[in-house]
Image (tube, rainbow, N blue to C red):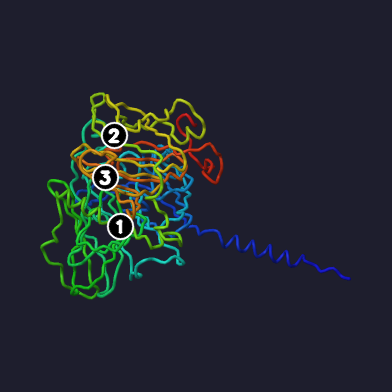
Amino acid sequence: MKQPCFLPFYLGILAWLCVFCVKAEDPYRNFNWVVTYGQISPLGVPQKGILINGMFPGPTIECETNDNVVVNVVNNLDEPFLITWNGVKQRKTSWQDGVLGTNCPIPPHSQWTYHMQVKDQIGTFSYFPSTGMHRAVGGFGGFNIQARPVIFVPYLKPAAEFTLLVSDWWKSDHKALRQILDSGKALPKPDGLLINGSPRATSFTGQEGQRYLFRVSNVALTTSINFRIQGHTLILVEIEGAHTLHESYESFDLHVGQSASFLVTLHSPAKQYFIVASSRFTKPALTATGILHYAGSTAKPSLPLPIGPTYQVHWSMKQARTIRWNLTANAARPNPQGSFHYGTIPITRTVVFTNSKAKIGGKLRYAVNKVSHINPATPLKLADYLNIPGVFTLNSIKPTPPAGPAILAPSVMGFTLHDFVEIVFQNNENSVQSWHLDGYDFWSVGFGGGQWNSTLRNKFYNMNDATSRYTVQVYPKSWSSILVSLDNKGMWNLRSANWARQYLGQQLYARVWNNEKSIYTEYDLPPNALRCGKAK
């Protein structure tokens, strides 16, 4: 009897699997960015700005959940240069984070390629230079991650999306600003605010009756802002990669490094309306305006500008407490956001970080728990991976603020992979602080005045529907608490989003570690990794 031949069947299955594997790979989005100096005049004074492909601000990256984003950066400046991706988690690969603790900077007149996957993320993000004071003169842009078509988005599809980048601005060159800080002096107050690189020329056009999504990011160096649109209500739908309950606002505070998305319906009489960003907690208040233009109308916007808050700290804190996680909405995955019950997870460790201003060697510095961070010539991550001694000391920063004077040192704290950590930011100064954690989002569970203590958890913590985010504000003479699941192995920068404070030491690195060497927890050193310092 003739035996059946299964070879064609097996070959067919093999071919199908090959096609499936090819189709299953997530899409690639490739960018080539040439970074140069160029003359710009945002405040009417010609100055040297940093352009990407001739653009100021830089191009917006538009991508989709799980896309592979490949950005080749050609550095045609006269200084080393890096870009960091604010809020992009860089799962298992802090090598792509683009800060001096993880990456050697790209030398002048050379290039380096970032390879990153926006794994399991949606929402509104940004990018900017992380070296020196480069971001004071440009090099920043938007980074928007759309949900996959198979994932339900908990709001009606907008007719279009608009990206708004609000920045503070100085008429001085970035080298002049850096020299001020290096000399031991504080950064002067900014000269103005910009929306998409202009104090008053940005405009957006929409159709009457349609709804639009406004993605707004505060990419300022030092300034909290209030955002509003004349005659229109802002419906908050997303904040820093998390879908929120749909609260309505006449105006909304965004602190340094924060992003949010608002649905705006064009329901007012057809004309032009002012879009306003104004500074918070500053004297005098700075203002930038743009225009929301109803298509087909010729009527100009009318004064006065819509009023926003200026110094009301309690108003801002009260508003922050109204932001709630949408527990039933999907985010990047099909399962609801609320299926992760963060409030039921035992806290394995509590850390209290206190920011402070200090004089070290006669010069102004900023510190966290009495350590003012300095970047060694060898990136911390590279030294850790290659076992290079003498670069940093693990746990050089203590988990609570110690007594004694502030010191200069590379600031690194060790954590165990999969720890669930409570971090309290204690601000005893008179200015608003803003803190950003690379590699993660976290739950912003509590705000309060005075000194934090453990008894305040029951009174002030939201353990049910606090939103996840990647940047949190801390009000003057106050505290803010976050909970974070440390599930992303690597060396991650926890920094003041106020760039002058970060530059002068208000930052540290969290070494999230276990002893397992596996690509399932962390990718190996990339083949194209730059070498510098002791790693050359």
Numbered tag placed on residue 284 in the rendering = none
User: Amino acid type of disc 3?
Assistant: Leu
**Residue 241 visible in the shown view:** yes
The image position of residue 212, as x and y in percent, is 30, 68
Percent of width and height locating residue 300? 15, 69
Residue bearing the label numbered 1: 324
Q: Nearer the viewer, residue 505 or 205?
A: 505
| Cα–Cα span, label 1 and label 2 | 34 Å
Whether tag 1 and tag 2 are in contact, CB under 8 A, the answer is no
State the residue at coordinates (52%, 42%).
526
Q: Disc 2 residue type?
A: Leu
Q: Residue at x 36, y 48 (%)?
A: 442
- In the drawing, does residue 173 fall left or right of residue 391? left
Q: Which mark is residue 504?
A: 2
* Residue, disc 3: 221
As rendered, which of 358 and 110 lies closer to the eye? 358
Q: Which SS class for mark 1? A: loop
* Left or right: where 407 falls relative to 227: right
When asked about the image quadrant of residue 215, the answer is: bottom left
Label 2 residue SS: loop
3D distance between C-alphas at marks 3 and 2: 13 Å
| Residue 328 coordinates in the image, percent (x, y) | 38, 63
Q: Is residue 363 above or below residue 133?
A: above
User: Going from the N terminus, do you reach mark 1 or mark 2 first?
Assistant: 1
How many labels sit on residues? 3
The crowding category of the residue bearing disc 3, from other C-alpha atoms within 10 Å (few below 14, some 14 to 19, many at least 20), is many
Name the kind of residue labelled 1 in the image.
Answer: Arg
